[in-house]
Amino acid sequence: MDFNKPQKSKRSFGRIFLFFIGGVFLLTVVTSVISALFSDGFMESDNQIAIVEIQGMISGSRETVRQLRKFQHDPKVKGIIVRIDSPGGAVGPSQEIYNAVARIREEGGKKIVASMGSVAASGGYYIASAADTIFANPGTLTGSIGVIMAFSNIQDLIEKIGIRPEVIKSGAFKDVGSPVRPISSKERKLLQNLVDDVYQQFVDDVAKGRNLPTEVVRRLADGRVYTGRQALALKMVDRMGGLQDAIDLLAAQAGIAGSPKIVQEEEKVSLMDWLLRSSIRKNLTETLSPHTYPSLQFLWTVQ
């Protein structure tokens, strides 16, 4: 009889072990199902406020426009905030994002609000002007309505080194803005016409977005920056306040009782992007790949 006791103990241990394994498996399955349901939007709140961030230099628009369109057509999202912390950037991408914001505003269905962080200048302000409402902090730097085209002339440097560039071109203006020779008066006039045309587009779009006379905007559009408080007095923004104030306004406009659920896509940053956004970005990029061609920009810049 004594020899049976260890066998009974082994059988009991085996049952306990099987129950343990079965419990772990069941818990894993249940957790996976719940996770899948929530990731697919099941049981998510229908009272959502979406935030789309625009940070740093504006060099592209594809990802921002994609997010705006996604939240525009999501029935659970009751309002959209464009959070801007940018000195501006390239003209084309800024215009594409402006148009995406303006489309949401024009089509109705949900409100879109711009919330300015520390800086929302030039292209940053351009985008904000398309929103239904603009929030700025009293110390936000904004405005800088204007266009800039800048490039370097390194003729004296290459002459010292002993380099003599030779250019074969198909037209008189094909190498306009070349860094290896002075710009001619005809070329300067041509480039000034380009800047003036894009500047007029900037003024017209801000006037349309802010519902202001073109001449009023033109008087403000000499490139200078304004504080948020100054911009409010000039009707360039609508309210003083931060991101939470923008959330509260959208929730009230959408009839959301209590706190809305805030949804925002996580930014995926590659190693190269991270390096380019680091403190050495300006010196590194200008050293390794200097811009030797003129580039139109909605950009607040201090040389």
Image (spheres, grey):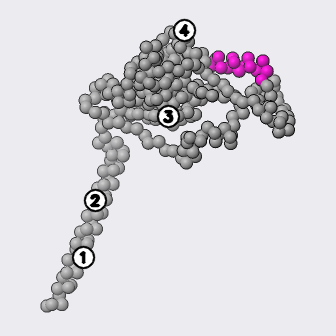
What secondary structure is found at the residue carrying circle 4?
helix
- N-terminal of the pair, mark 4 or mark 2, is 2
The magenta region covers: 183-198
The residue type indicated by label 1 comes to Gly
Kindly identify which numbered label has been placed on residue 55. 3
What secondary structure is found at the residue carrying circle 1?
helix
Kindly identify which numbered label has been placed on residue 284. none
Are the residues tagged 3 and 4 within 8 Å (C-beta)?
A: no
User: How far is mark 3 from mark 4, CA to CA?
Assistant: 30 Å
- N-terminal of the pair, mark 3 or mark 2, is 2
Residue occupying image coordinates x 30% and y 25%: 252
Query: Main structural element of the magenta stretch: helix, strand or loop?
Result: helix
User: How far is mark 4 from mark 1, CA to CA?
Assistant: 86 Å
What secondary structure is found at the residue carrying circle 2?
helix
Residue 42 in the image, given as x and y percentages of width and height: 31, 43
The residue tagged 1 is: 14
Residue occupying image coordinates x 54% and y 44%: 274
Q: Is residue 166 visible?
A: yes
The residue type indicated by label 3 comes to Gln
Kindly identify which numbered label has been placed on residue 27. 2
Residue occupying image coordinates x 39% and y 33%: 50
Neighbour tally class for label 1: few under 14, some 14-19, many 20 plus, Cα within 10 Å:
few
Extreme residue toward the front, this view: 160
